[in-house]
Image (spheres, rainbow, N blue to C red):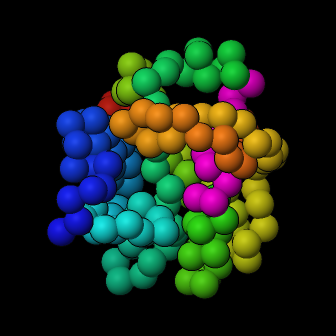
Amino acid sequence: MMTNLDVNTKRGQKSLEYEQRSVWLFENKYPQMTYAQTPKDSSAAVDAVIVNGRDIVGVVEQKSRNMTYRQLCNWDKEWLVTKSKIDNGRNAALSLGVPFIGFLYLIPDDLLLMQFITTKEGTYVPEIRYEVTATQATINGGLVERENAFISMNGATKVTWND
């Protein structure tokens, strides 16, 4: 096990709890589906695959944000994700012949937003703009300037605990 991973820190463990909550919301709404996460003790190109029976039906990038849906709307419903994560997810999904799906969990609202990012053919679904910006380097802080993707969450599926 690699000890220098962000997931091994206090903040990383809290982030993992939020990811598990988003998984619970997803599997509660879609009980025929399984969110099969990639190993957390090493770096992986994507966070998970979605499985229906024996079939992989999607590749997932999951993020949790400490913001409300209203706050997201104030940001033009755009989800900021590192461009390299979008490229990695698209490539993984394309290689498996499945869609690439974004899971954005909004912590204060206990709300999961699911957005198809690409089709199984690799075509982008939502509007995405790219910009080099300074953002937090990791969950544990720091600052880094890098190319980020701003994904429109218009049309995203909303999943709550009582769905």
Decide whether residue 64 is among the magenta residues: no
Give the residue drawn at x 78%, y 67%: 123
Image quadrant in which you'd find residue 140: top left
Residue 20 seen in render: no
Give the residue drawn at x 50%, y 47%: 103
Q: In front here: 138 or 85?
A: 138
Say whether residue 95 is left or right of residue 51. Answer: right
Instruction: In the rendered view, tell whether residue 67 sits above or below residue 81.
Output: above
Instruction: In the rendered view, tell whether residue 94 sits above or below residue 34.
Output: below
Q: In front here: 93 or 45?
A: 45
Which region is colored magenta? 76-85
* Count of numbered tags: 0
Say whether residue 56 is left or right of residue 25. Answer: right
Image quadrant in which you'd find residue 125: bottom right
Say whether residue 89 is left or right of residue 153. Answer: left
Please identify the quadrant where the N terminus is shown. bottom left
Give the residue drawn at x 28%, y 50%: 7
Give the residue drawn at x 69%, y 22%: 75
Decide whether residue 83 is among the magenta residues: yes
Could you say where residue 42 lies in the image, as x and y percent from the top left? 31, 68
Q: In front here: 161 or 98?
A: 98
Say whether residue 74 is left or right of residue 30. Answer: right
Could you say where residue 4 lies in the image, as x and y percent from the top left? 27, 56
Could you say where residue 163 lies in the image, as x and y percent from the top left? 39, 36
Could you say where residue 40 lies in the image, as x and y percent from the top left? 27, 62
Residue 2 seen in render: yes
